Amino acid sequence: MTDKIDAEQFNDDELEAPAWLNPQFIGEILSAYEEAPELKVIDLKITPASFQGDHYASVMFRTTAEYTTSKGKFSKPLIIKTMPEQEGHKKDMLSESHIFETEIGMYCQVLPEFERILREAGDNTKLFVPCIYHSLDPRRVMIFEDLVPQGYSVIRDRPVALEELKTAFSKLAKWHAVSMKVINEQPAFLKEFKYGLFDMPTIQNDPFVTTGMKSFIEMLDNLPDLKKYKPYFEQIQEKHLKRLEAEMQEYHKNRRNDGYYVLCHGDFHLRNMMFKNNKETGNHEDTMLVDFQLSNLCPITVDLTYSIYMLMEPEQRRDMGKDLINYYFTVLVATLKSIGYKGDMPTQAKLWEQIHRNKYYDFFLISTFLPLILAIKSNTFKMHDLIQNPETRQKTYFLDTYVKDVTKLLPKFEKLGYFKGL
């Protein structure tokens, strides 16, 4: 059964569970997981697992299964993740993608191995929540333990605190460090992880992606304080996506001796992590990264640059994420040393050189993704409208929060030399 809910809070395709998501289906999965052939589901409550703006690249449900075995009566909170079945933009965008194959590989092969490497070094960091079931046929489905009953939550109604950000960057640094060791010692283990955002079949023809720079230039033209930057972006309007694609696929097509490469998360933003804070003291205890659908081998800058625009608060963005990225770097190096990395140790100076060199990701994110994420944080726009409706998207370019951000960031671009040699 699906509980009665406030439909306005949720994605339309998550309001009604598909017919196959029923007590028999969940019972068979739990029976195998619990090794209890006599297990029987006696009640199944199903609700949407996420709110408007939390995600776009899947359909998610939260369920609590009440069941009996020979040992008694039990309850199991679960998250079910599947592909869109409703006809429309989301299904068209995702149907031919590799996102489920990638995420299954991450949960079932890569992340357990990464944790094993950390454990051997005496580091008990938890990188992922267990996946109790996955399937690609007859439908793409993954089922996880629900983190909410364990005290985790998504931040939607307040700014993320610095301590919470630092925990997220610490986990990312440890993950990146282990991936550098694996790339160095057994690169074949990760060879299948080559599908990032711009490897999705329809993404480069999607109006949301292709019209972002045009809308950005129109915004610059309408604001006297920013109009001077318009010619720079006009110069790159026709080529910026191709340049970005080259940056993101550098590991596979044009690897550099002075570049650092990792298995990146690929979508390292606030709604793809859950935070646990002590209920009594309020002290931060843990951050759990989720949603590994875009994880791929690429420059280390992909996650870091993305985080500046999609994770950090404006005050951290003012200095291009300097303090948090430098904190990340200290954890990265410490972890590389602790796990016995045998390659050349990265340096902070070369990391920043690489971040600044791959500036076309900055150009794309500030012009296309930053207005989206700020609109979502304002809680006044629906995700599907932002992705699919050009008139709605255009409004986001004139949000006060976005204009203030851009007004602070473009002088930083100029100071860093981003506009030279375009």
Image (cartoon, rainbow, N blue to C red):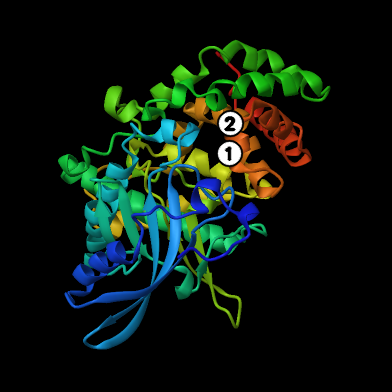
Residue 400 in percent (x, y) is at: 78, 39
**Closest to the observer, 369 or 79:** 79
181 to the left or right of 200? left
Residue drawn at x 55%, y 77% as measured from the top left:
278
**Closest to the observer, 99 or 31:** 31
Q: Which amino acid, mark 2?
A: Gln
150 to the left or right of 386? left
Residue drawn at x 39%, y 39% as measured from the top left:
300
Could you say which disc has been placed on residue 384 in the image? 1
**Closest to the observer, 132 or 102:** 132
Residue 340 vertical position relative to residue 388 in the rendered view, above or below: below
The image quadrant that residue 250 belongs to is top left
Residue 264 in percent (x, y) is at: 37, 43
Q: Residues within 10 Å of mark 2 (few under 14, many from 20)?
A: some
Tell me if residue 171 can be seen: yes
Of all residues, the one furthest to the right in this rendering is: 224
Residue wearing tag 2: 388
Residue 47 vertical position relative to residue 325 in the rendered view, above or below: below
Do the CB atoms of the residues marked 2 and 1 lie less than 8 Å apart?
Answer: yes
